Image: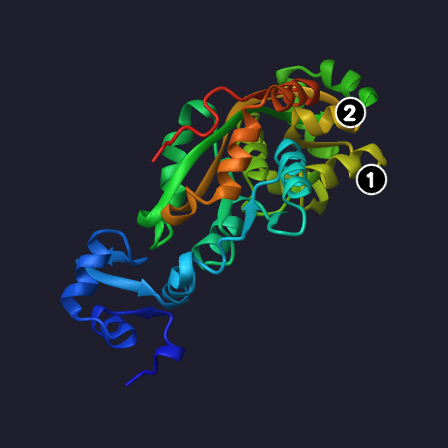
Amino acid sequence: MTEPAELTYMSVKQVSAYLSLSEKKVYSMANDCILPASKITGKWLFPKILIDRWIMESCHSGILSDRMHITGSDDPLLSMLVAKVMSQVGTSELVSYSSTGSSLGLDILSRGYADVCALHWGRLEDSNESHLELLKKYPNHQQWLMLHGFNRKQGLMMRPETHLKYETLTEASASTSLPSWRWIARQAGSGSQQHLEQWLATKDIDFEEVNSTIVAQSERELAGYIARHNGDIGFGCQSVAFESGLSFVPILTESFDFVMPQSIYFRRQLQQLLCMFQEPKSIQLAATLGGYDLTDCGKLLM
């Protein structure tokens, strides 16, 4: 019989033995969303790494409740507010943020290595459907909540002289001229890269056809490449473009949202961050950065 330490997913019987609970109790806790689990073809499966984390967080109100790690999509406003929260809590707690892109962030969240994942995946008008479809790829998504963060403008970032050339393009000339420009890409699985590829498709351009040799791992890294003349154009958010002194061509508005296990929702660090988004100074900061709408920040989406 496979030892628990060697398992990736556990059955009800294995969880029952692992936790010294009756199978009836395991079924009850899974149905009540107490234990992290997913029902596949009528059978419950329990990711072992999340069962272990659940045990740790159940110890004396959760030994990990003094920290919160956010991963996923990159955003300058979120980065600034996380830093502000950290400055307030000092050395008593830990609030951290590492941008990885939406897909990798969800992978990390599903394995229990992060508490919150930020994501953006599609246009604002399609975000509820596109985000839900993305979450369904993960077996423990039924134990997750999704909160609205904010809306933000996404589009093309380029230097002012490139912008002048861009404005002279016609629909006919765009499909022949744009592929030769030096494009800065984002990593596969990032929301910005998906936006770019979908926008290029509207111009009858396949991303594989464009001149792109550099892949940026964040919005600011992408803007830095363009500002240093390592590339000509890329896809990102308005606030980063303006921060780097670049021109910005708005293409779409997107919903930037937060996904987390249900147990994280009431964690004080998250509530502190959500409250900070609604403070007048944060609203003013968002206006200064440009391209944000903080209406309904913290609204429960699923």
Q: Pick out the residue farthest to the bottom.
A: 1
Residue 193 lies, with reference to residue 149, above or below; the image says below
Distance from label 1 to label 2 (Cα)? 14 Å
**Can see residue 231?**
no
Residue that appears at 32% across and 83% down: 2
Dot 2 alpha-carbon crowd within 10 angstroms: few under 14, some 14 to 19, many 20 or more: many
The residue where tag 1 is placed is 230
Q: Which mark is residue 105?
A: none
Q: Relative to 18, say whether 181 is above or below.
A: above
Q: Quadrant of residue 229?
A: top right
The kind of residue on which mark 2 rests is Leu
**Furthest residue in direction left, as rendered:** 24
* As drawn, 104 above or below 248: below
**Quadrant of the rendering where the C terminus is positioned:** top left
Q: Is residue 214 left or right of residue 12?
A: right
Residue carrying label 2: 246
Residue ranking furthest to the right: 228
**Residue 273 visible, this orientation:** yes
Mark 1 or 2, nearer chain start:
1
Q: Amino acid at mark 1?
A: Asn
x and y percentages locating residue 77 in the rendered image: 64, 31
Q: Quadrant of residue 238?
A: top right
Q: How many marks?
A: 2
Q: Which of 50 and 58 lies nearest the eye of the viewer?
A: 58
Closer-to-camera residue (269/130) = 269
User: Residue shown at 80%/24% (left/top)?
Assistant: 245
Specify few, some or many for label 1: CA neighbours under 10 Å numbering under 14, 14-19, or 20 or more.
Answer: some
Are the two marked residues, 1 and 2, in contact with CB atoms closer than 8 angstroms? no
- Depth check, mark 1 against mark 2: the one in front is 2
Give percent across and percent down for residue 69: 56, 50
